[in-house]
Amino acid sequence: MKRTLLAIFILSLAVHAAERRAKNVILFIGDAGGVPTLHAASLYGHKDPQKLYIQNMPHIALVDTSPADAWVTDSAAGMTAIVTGQKTNNGVISQSASAVKGQTDGETLETLLEFAEQHGLSTGVLSNMSMVDATPAACYAHSNDRGKAGEIFAQILSPRAGDGVDLVIGAGRKQILAATEKMGLNIADALSKKGYAFYDSPGAIQPNDRRVVALFDSGDYEAWPAVERAISILSRNNKGYFLMVEWDMHTTNTKRGLDRVLEMDDVIRKVAGTVKNDTLLLFAADHSFDLRVRGGRKGDVLIPEPGEAKPKIRVDNGHTGEQVLAAAQGPGAERVHGFIRNTDLFQIMMAAYGWTKPAVSFATGR
């Protein structure tokens, strides 16, 4: 019996030792990109179901997205769960569920980006949304109110781990400059002192840049060149990197939303063909959205011009609480299976890196 137990123990050690670790993790977030939206995008873009690259990644799971205080999440609580492994209340960014929105702080929750900084990795956030919007903000900031734009962005300048996020690319320039100016903060000067190049367009980013903040007035920029440049910059770090890429998939404007699904799907396809096998690629939605394909025949135009035909898609403008898809490939992707929680995605990424605890505790400083 003892020999049997010893053999099992040795075998488990061997399996653990042989398990591939991820040097890099790229987390793709489709904001409001639930299963119905992905399905509609495949029909719209490919005239057939299950033709997205995302839908054909080798490891998939269905993910509960509920926050701590409700059944339907907003992006703040949804992303907090994904990057910290703990659920919080709607409207709260990377603080615990003891936070009261706009009134009381909860405990600070360390994010995956902050863990990566502690381990010496390079880090980046990229989005076609404002860089103080809930999804990117949850990676680098902590706030009891997702609406505190100035306070949120200012945390880039006072990181809790390492030297802070290295690469910030996205929209919200006017909003961020106005909010920080109101606080008496000159962003251009402050970023320069911290070693960041500060740009107002994706094309301005230089190949030899190492730390970049690029803020644009509009999120309508081409995703792939920006993602490609981000990976090029971050991959110079021999220790690896963590990159979060968010693309807005809300379908309040149905055609625009589905076009953005197809754009991100193409980006993921290209990234998968570019990065080495030491990189975990993980796609998930922070929440689903109330869209349904309600009719139509094969060959029909799914989104007819106004007045041409009865719409085939019904959209009710709101988040919904059903499970969303997670899809993955690369080291650690095999953990993505079955029905899981949004907080499990954090644990999956931590395990892919081979991390079980932070290098430094915010609470103890050790």
Image (cartoon, grey):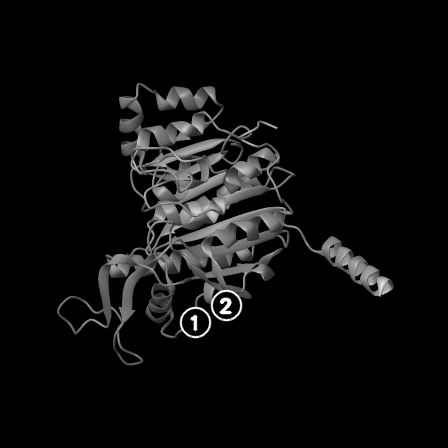
- Mark 1: which amino acid? Gln
For the point 50% across and 29% down, the residue is 160
Q: Is residue 60 above or below residue 96?
A: below
Q: Position of residue 130 (x, y in %)?
A: 33, 40
What residue would you read off at disc 1? 50
Left/right of residue 331 with respect to residue 100 in the rendered view: right
In the rendered image, is residue 74 in sight? yes
As displayed, is residue 293 above or below residue 241? below
Is 238 placed left or right of 282 in the picture?
Answer: right
- For the point 61% across and 51% down, the residue is 352
Q: Label 2's element?
A: helix
Near-viewer residue (235 or 35):
35
Say whether marks 2 and 1 touch (CB < 8 Å): yes
Q: Amino acid at mark 2?
A: Asn
State the image coordinates of residue 274 (x, y, percent, origin top left): 56, 53
Local SS, label 1: loop
Alpha carbon of mark 2 to alpha carbon of mark 1: how far?
A: 7 Å
Left or right: 74 as drawn, with respect to 357: left
User: How crowded is the residue under tag 2: few (<14 C-alpha within 10 Å), some, or many (20+)?
Assistant: few
Front in this rendered view, residue 47 or 93: 93
Q: Is residue 169 above or below residue 312?
A: above
| Residue 146 pos. (x, y %) | 32, 38
Residue furthest bottom as drawn: 297
Instruction: Quickly name the residue at label 2.
Output: 56
The image shows residue 9 at horizontal and vertical percentages of 78, 58
Which quarter of the figure is the N terminus placed in?
A: bottom right
User: Is residue 222 visible to us here?
Assistant: no
Q: Residues within 10 Å of mark 1 (few under 14, many from 20)?
A: some
Q: Residue furthest front?
A: 1
Q: Looking at the image, tell me whether mark 2 or mark 1 is earlier in sequence order.
A: 1
Tell me what residue is drawn at x 65 percent, y 47 percent: 354
Q: Which quadrant is home to the C terminus?
A: top right
